[in-house]
Amino acid sequence: MQNKIGIGTANFGSYYGANNKKISRIKAKEIIEILKKNRINLIDTSSEYSGSEEILGNLGISKFNIVTKIRIPDNFVIDDMHKIEKIFFLSLKKLKVKRVYALLIQNCDELLKKNGKYFYNFFLKLKEAGLIKKLGFSVYSTSTLNRLNKKFKFNIVQIPLNILDQRFLKKDLLKKLKKKKIEIHSRSSFLQGWLLMKNNQMSKNYKNFKIFSKVDNFIKDNNYDKLSYLLNFSQNIKEIDYVILGIDNPKQLKKIIFSSKDNKFKFKKFSVNADTKLIDPRLWKKR
């Protein structure tokens, strides 16, 4: 199977995810060396990941395909464009690169507002100037993606996808994107680590919290490795170009690389697409 792994770096230098793990500079260096050795060339970061860009920049990652993300200010005004420009060029400086492989716009609903086109045109100018190769979106819902698809031209998108969250697999949405030659990255294969946890303690306030036990029992009954099963669910979808994975440590990365080659699974329907309070981390209550 083609290696589709890309590494997310939200926890490089700061705490992130359900397990609240932080990767030090020393561990980050070890991770980068493992990536080089295994020819994994995609790194995902963001201007909002505290410390991530600085750590990466000091590790010599210019030969990697770097995907960075940028957030548009809520309820923006035209003057905010200068702030966005400053943030983007600061990211290049921190990463110590002259250009990036892709720029993804977060909180894309802002682009759908009255003056959103002005911001998008600014990003297009960055692309035309050769500062980014691909321009697109990091989305959370199919409705937002569909609206963006009607209004803007783009060539990359990042979506949430895992054994519980299969919203983007409906209505041949991914196939339609591929016909337009749009590169597709998936994230949240492990639902910020919740799906990997033993004796999952996801709050009983969530309607479908028992689904975690059902997934665990199915994996156990079939003698599957949990990490391999969850990873390959996303990796087996042919329309997905890269599966972006957050990692806790170098040892886990090595296991992920090994697990990505395993392809002997039967996938059962566990999706709870309607329960967005469970599958969308933005809606989780503070734990």
Image: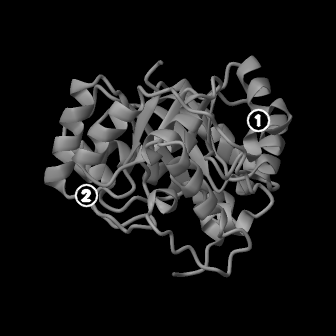
Residue in the image at 76% along x and 18% along y: 179
- Which label is found at residue 136? none
Residue in the image at 23% along x and 38% along y: 32
Look at label 1 and name its amino acid: Phe
Q: How many marks?
A: 2
In the displayed image of the protein, which residue is found farthest to the front? Answer: 221
Residue in the image at 21% along x and 25% along y: 37
Q: Earlier in the sequence, mark 2 or mark 1?
A: 2
Whether pointer 2 and pointer 1 mark residues with C-beta atoms closer than 8 Å, the reply is no
- In the displayed structure, 227 sits above or below 6; it is below
Q: Residues within 10 Å of mark 2 (few under 14, many from 20)?
A: many
Residue in the image at 73% along x and 63% along y: 276
Task: Give the image quarter of residue 217.
Answer: bottom right
Look at label 2 and name its amino acid: Ile
Q: Which residue is mark 2?
A: 23
**On the rendered structure, is 285 left or right of 1?**
right
**Residue 126 visible somewhere in the drawing:** no
Task: Give the image quarter of residue 136.
Answer: top right
Q: Which residue is mark 1?
A: 152
Q: Nearer the viewer, mark 2 or mark 1?
A: 2
**On the rendered structure, is 267 left or right of 222?**
right
